[in-house]
Image: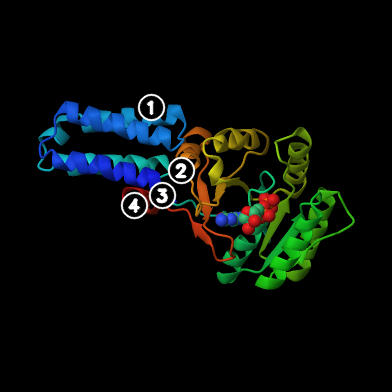
C-alpha cells in the first residue's frame, strides 16, 4: 500500500539530507518533486497546490535555512503537513446517549459495505458492545445472505426480511428488534448501485430521516483514487455524512483518495479496511499512515 509514494518521498528526502546546507533553490527543487509525487499518487490538484504552498511558506522561512539541521527540518514540515492533510488526529465513532447507537453505511456497490458492517460489528463486539446488523441491501439478494453468514461467523445478531423491499420499514422493525435484544449498537447495511442515482440517494435519505442514525459512514474503495472525492461530495450533499471508511487499503492504492478527501470534503476518514477478513480493519491514524509513507 502506498509503495510508490513512499519510495518517491524517500528519494526526495535522501537528496535533501545529502545537501548538508539547504539553499532556497534546493527547497524549491524538493518541493517540485513533492508536488509531482503527489500528483502521480492521484491526489486532487488543488489539494497538492495548497499543500506545497504551505510547506514552501514554512520551509523558506529563515529558521529552516539557517537551522542546525535544515534537511531534517524540511522533512519534519512535510511530515506534519501530511498528518494535517489526513485529518490531524484519529476521529472516533459517535456513541449516542440513547440505545442503540445507530450507524448507517452508504456507498457504491462493491465498495465493501457489507464486509465493513461485519468488521465494524466485530470491532464493537470486542469492546463489549451488543450489536445488531440490519440487512438493508435489499436489491442484491446475495447481500442479505452474505450478512447472515458473516453474522453467524462473528456471532452477531442480524435482522433481515427477505421478502420486503421497503428499507425504511426494515430499519424500523430492526430498531424494534434492537430494543428487544438490548443492543447497544445497530449497524445498517444499505444498497449500493454501480453509479450514484437519485433513487439510491432518496432511499438513503428516507432512512436517515426516519431512523435518525447518529453516525453515517460512507464506505469508499481506496483504489478509485481522487474519484472518491466527487463521490464523497455527492453523498455528503444529500446525507451530511459523518465520516469515511476507505476499504481495500491493502491493495495497490496510490493514496489519492486518502490524501484528498479530508481537505476537500471536510469529513474525516475513520477506518481503513486492510483485507477481506473480519479482523482486517484498522482505526485510521493519520500519523501512522504518514510514517508508513515516509518510512
Ligand atoms: P458491498 O457491495 O459494498 O457490500 O461490497 P462487499 O462487502 O460485498 O465487498 C466487495 C468485495 O470487496 C468483496 O470481495 C470483499 O471481500 C472485498 N473487500 C471488502 N473490503 C476489503 C478490504 O479492505 N480489502 C480487500 N482486499 N478486499 C475487500
Tell me which numbered mark, 1 or 2, is placed earlier along the sequence.
1
2 vs 4, front mark? 2
The residue that disc 3 covers is 286
Residue 97 visible in image: no
**Secondary element type, mark 4:** helix
Q: CA distance from mark 1 to mark 2?
A: 18 Å
The mark found on residue 254 in the picture is 2
Say above or below: 15 vs 137.
Answer: above
Tell which tag, 3 or 2, sits nearer the viewer: 2
Q: Is residue 100 left or right of residue 39?
A: right
* Residue designated by label 4: 291
Q: Report how far apart the C-alphas of labels 3 and 4 lie in the structure.
A: 9 Å
Percent position (x, y) of residue 208? 72, 44
Distance between mark 4 and mark 1 Cα atoms: 22 Å
Residue in the image at 32% along x and 48% along y: 294
Report the residue marked by disc 1: 49
Amino acid at each position: 500500500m502506498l509503495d510508490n509514494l513512499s519510495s518517491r518521498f524517500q528519494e526526495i528526502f535522501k537528496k535533501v539530507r545529502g545537501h548538508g546546507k539547504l539553499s532556497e533553490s534546493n527547497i524549491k527543487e524538493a518541493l517540485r518533486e513533492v508536488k509531482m509525487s503527489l500528483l502521480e499518487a492521484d491526489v486532487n490538484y488543488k489539494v497538492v497546490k495548497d499543500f506545497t504552498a504551505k510547506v514552501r511558506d514554512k520551509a523558506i522561512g529563515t529558521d529552516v535555512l539557517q537551522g542546525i539541521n535544515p534537511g531534517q527540518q524540511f522533512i519534519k514540515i512535510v511530515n506534519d503537513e501530511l498528518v494535517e492533510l489526513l485529518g490531524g488526529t484519529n476521529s472516533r465513532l459517535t456513541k449516542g446517549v440513547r440505545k442503540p447507537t445507530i450507524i448507517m453505511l452508504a456507498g457504491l456497490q462493491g465498495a465493501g459495505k457489507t464486509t465493513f458492517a461485519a468488521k465494524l460489528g466485530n470491532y464493537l463486539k470486542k469492546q463489549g458492545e451488543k450489536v445488531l446488523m440490519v440487512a438493508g441491501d435489499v436489491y442484491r439478494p446475495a447481500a442479505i445472505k452474505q450478512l447472515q453468514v458473516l453474522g453467524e461467523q462473528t456471532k452477531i445478531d442480524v435482522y433481515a426480511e427477505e421478502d420486503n423491499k421497503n428499507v425504511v420499514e426494515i430499519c424500523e422493525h430492526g430498531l424494534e428488534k434492537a430494543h428487544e435484544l438490548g443492543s447497544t449498537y445497530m449497524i445498517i447495511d444499505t444498497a449500493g448501485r454501480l453509479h450514484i442515482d437519485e433513487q439510491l440517494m432518496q432511499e438513503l435519505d428516507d432512512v436517515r430521516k426516519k431512523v435518525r442514525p447518529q453516525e453515517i459512514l460512507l464506505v469508499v474503495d481506496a483504489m478509485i483514487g481522487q474519484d472518491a472525492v466527487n463521490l464523497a461530495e455527492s453523498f455528503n450533499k444529500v446525507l451530511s455524512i459523518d465520516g469515511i471508511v476507505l476499504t481495500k487499503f491493502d491493495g495497490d492504492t496510490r493514496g489519492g483518495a486518502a490524501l484528498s478527501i479530508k481537505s476537500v470534503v471536510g469529513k474525516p476518514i475513520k477506518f481503513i479496511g486492510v483485507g477481506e477478513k473480519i479482523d482486517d480493519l484498522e482505526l485510521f491514524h493519520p500519523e501512522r499512515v504518514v510514517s508508513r509513507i515516509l518510512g
